[in-house]
Structure formats: structure tokens, C-alpha cells
Amino acid sequence: MHKQGYLGKFSILIMTLFFLFGCQSAPQKNAVASKNNASFDVHTVVSAEETHVPEETQKLNYDSTFSSTDESVHFVMDISQEISAADLPLVRVTPHYLTGQDAERTAYALFPEADFYEPALLLNPALTKGEIQKKINLWSNYVSEDSLREILGDDVGDNYLSSTANLVKKFIERYSMKYDTAPEGDIHTLCPWKMRKSLEYMYTKEELAEMGENLEDSNDEISAKCYVNEIPYYYTVSTRNKNDYKVNLISAIIYDGESPREIENRIYSAKLCRTQEPSSEQIESIKERATQVLSKMNLGEWQIDRCKIEKQTYGTQSEYYVYVDAVPTFNGIPAIRLRQLDGLRNEDGYAASQYITDANFCFSANGDIVFFRLYTPLDVKEIVTDHVKTMGMNELLERAKEVLELSDAYAYQFGSYLQFIDEQVQCDVTVSEIEYGLTRIKVQDQADDYYYVPAISLKGSVEYVGQESNKTYYVSENPEVLVVINAIDGTVINRTNS
């Protein structure tokens, strides 16, 4: 997606797949996208006549059964839920462009006891004899299929294990040849916390000159390397403010340079995460640590909105990963969690030029960081009003129903694949959850200004079934966001940036 691929070296790859729509009939009317029209502009200066305390709630009961206008989707809305009735603000924000000071502060918030060093080049790194020997010693433990099976499991197959064992041996041979000419002692310097161009972390100056690359096209970046309890981490702060797209990203992952099929990542992850299933006390401790880290970063106010445990099995060994996610808050009101944007390059004046503000942690059961990402920290420009006037909840639900009626089977998670199915497919959608909070929309034709507006997000399950075969082609594993409605004016908030 992006020329410099700043996420690629962290194994965080965001890919966009484009599919042609099939030939089922399209809706006859179009839903209204949120474009800050006259209705919204008027309401930005109108405060709610009534006020509510933060703890106040309201009970919702909403039932309706209907179909889309083209009959390709059957809907069941069955919402019975208690939601917040707190006053919601209207906030104008701008992305915070990361600096060297931010990079240093957030690094020590993540790893307070670590020393941070300038990393070796990602391509063709210069390593010392000690670093090479360390890699050889580690890899030498995994030159057989049985030893690899311990960290990779049985599911990868014997051929994969055999070829990986051979590859490990070749890496050992190659690095053994490098050992004789490698420098002695420590050649790495402490991180100076000064921005450089991202390409300078990949190539030497001579290589860049030979390639003829324009450094000004690449992101500004600070990368550093540290060790915590012998676990290597690669830490990066990346920022970009150009017309094509804009980025502010902080990331930390387990990484110690190249290894055969990235087995080092598996080795270190197994070392951290092969534990007993985390207890409730451990989960609370991990959530508290995440909260403290975000507070010490001093990049806005955050609230943890999601925590889940994932068990991964490799042969007879189990590993436990604790995922903790957080969203920004304004006046104590959290943003609604939406799927991260797939792309930023859209010339529409209302399209976002920055990723959605979001923070993601992964921990071991013992609280060790496995990875961390933070997208687009924010600076508040203005609290337009502390309690903006919004539409009534029943009116918003009726508006959401109208929008859903205008959708078709291509609008949901599996819709892009319908073109590959030979029979007619019925899409059944059950709307079962509502979330009321703040959601980001773009200020028209302002490159770096956004509003966080009150909104409702409807979630539920989607199922696609062949009408002739009765075959189930797709069913939601988790609730999906189906529609997001601006609670000020009832417009649809585009959650994909397309």
C-alpha cells in the first residue's frame, strides 16, 4: 500500500484486496454518507437542553424484521440492552505528530529499565562476533525436525519441518563464514532520539546513493533496539506529513534480525508464553500495566475497551497470549471501536488521511510485552460543547433501519466473494448489539482536522446460505459492525474510508 512499507518490517502487513461486484441487483436508493452537511453544521453550536450524570443509563428494547429493498438481505433487529445516557461532547481534534521527545518518553514507558541502542541495518546488518555466535548457538538447538516440532507444532507437516531444518543449517554455515571478519566488542551506540529517514535504517548511504532513492519520499523515523530479560525488542516511532498520506505510529515487537523462517520469533514467544492459563488476578494486573503505560506516554487520555485471552497450541505445548486494546476518551467518554482503515489514499475531501486512533498490546500471562502498536495520537483543538444535542435513540434506530434497508448482500463481510459463487445466496443479518459513544469523522477539506461526534454503532451476525444447495458459505465468528450513525444528524459514518 505505502511505498516505503514502514509496517512491513514489523510483520504488521495491511493489505487491501479489491473485488468486482457481482450482478445481483443494487439498492434503488443510496444511504447518506456523513459529509458535515448543513444539518450537522447547525447542530455543532447547539447544546442539549437536558443534562445527564455520567452514571445515568437508559434501557433499549427494539424489535423489527424486514428485508433490503433488493430482497438480497433479510434482517432481524433484536436489541435489548442498557446503554449509557451520559452527556456526550462534540470535540475537534488534530493528529499529534510524533517527535524525538515523544519517542524517548514512550520507549521508557514500555520498557522502563532498558537501554536503547541504534539498531543494525535491517538489510545486511553489521554484527559483532558475539552477536553472530549468539545466533549460531540459538539456531543450533533447532537443526532437527524433532526440535523444530517443539516450537512449530505438528500441523506444519513433515516436509516443512525437514526443509526448515535444512534452512537452519544453511544459515549456520553462512553466519559461520561471517564470523571471521566480524568486529570484536560492542559497536552499537545509544539511541540519540533524533529523527532519520526510514530508508536510512535499511541501507547504507552508499547503497542509497547508488539506488538513487529520494529520501524525502520516506517517513521520518526513530528506531531502537533493547533487551528485556534477554528478549530482544525492536522499537519504532514513524511519522509522515505529506500530501499522499499521513502517519503517526509507535510499534514494538520481538525481533533480533533475520533468522530462518523467523524461528527466533517463535523461540522467544514460546519462552514468554508457555505458561499456565492466566488467572483473573493476572488479567487485572496486565490491564493495570497497560493503563499505566499509556498514562506515562502522555499522548492523550485512554480507556481499555477490550481484553481477550488466546490459546495457541503447538504439538502438546500451549501458549497463552493476552490482548489488551484501548481507545481514546474525551471528557471521560470513550470512542467506539471500529475496524482499522485499510488505506489512506482517497482524494474525497471527507476521507481520512490518518489511521483511526487505537492502541493494541499483547502480553504473556506474566505481563511480558509480546508486541505493542499505537496509531495516531491526538491533540484536542476544541471542546465545541460538553453536551451536544442529539437525536432520540428510537429515532436513531429507525434511521439505522432505513440505512440497512438500502444495503445489499455485497455490503457485508463476505459480500466481495459472492462473484465466485454460481448460485443465488441469501444473506441473513441479526442485529443484536448497540454501542453509544464517540466516533471520528473528517472535517471537510481540512487535512488534519477531525470531529469526534456522538454516534451509535450497531453490531450483529451475518450468515450467507446458498438458496439451492442450502450450503452455509459464511457465518460470523464474532459480532460485526454493521452500520454507524451520526447521532447529531443521522448521517451514515463511513467506516472504511472508501
Image (cartoon, rainbow, N blue to C red):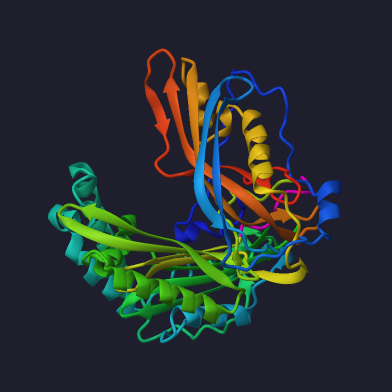
Q: What stretch is highlighted in magenta?
A: 348-356
Q: Say which quarter of the image contains residue 86.
A: bottom right
Q: Please, is residue 453 above or below residue 347 in the view?
A: below
Residue 16: image x %, image y %? 56, 42
Q: Please, is residue 81 above or below residue 274 in the view?
A: above
Q: Which residue is drawn at 48% across and 28% down?
A: 428
> Looking at the image, which is closer to me, 250 or 391?
391
> Looking at the image, which is closer to me, 139 or 339?
339
Relative to 443, 114 lies left or right: left
Q: Say which quarter of the image contains residue 179.
A: bottom left
Reply yes or no: does residue 107 show up in magenta.
no
Residue 357: image x %, image y %? 60, 62
Relative to 465, 82 lies left or right: right
Q: Say which quarter of the image contains residue 442.
A: bottom right
Would residue 198 be seen by someone viewing this image from the given angle?
A: no
Predominant SS of the magenta segment: loop
Reply yes or no: does residue 349 show up in magenta.
yes
Residue 29: image x %, image y %? 73, 26
Q: Quadrant of the C terminus?
A: top right
Instruction: State how many labels appear.
Output: 0
Q: Residue at x 38, y 25 (%)?
A: 472
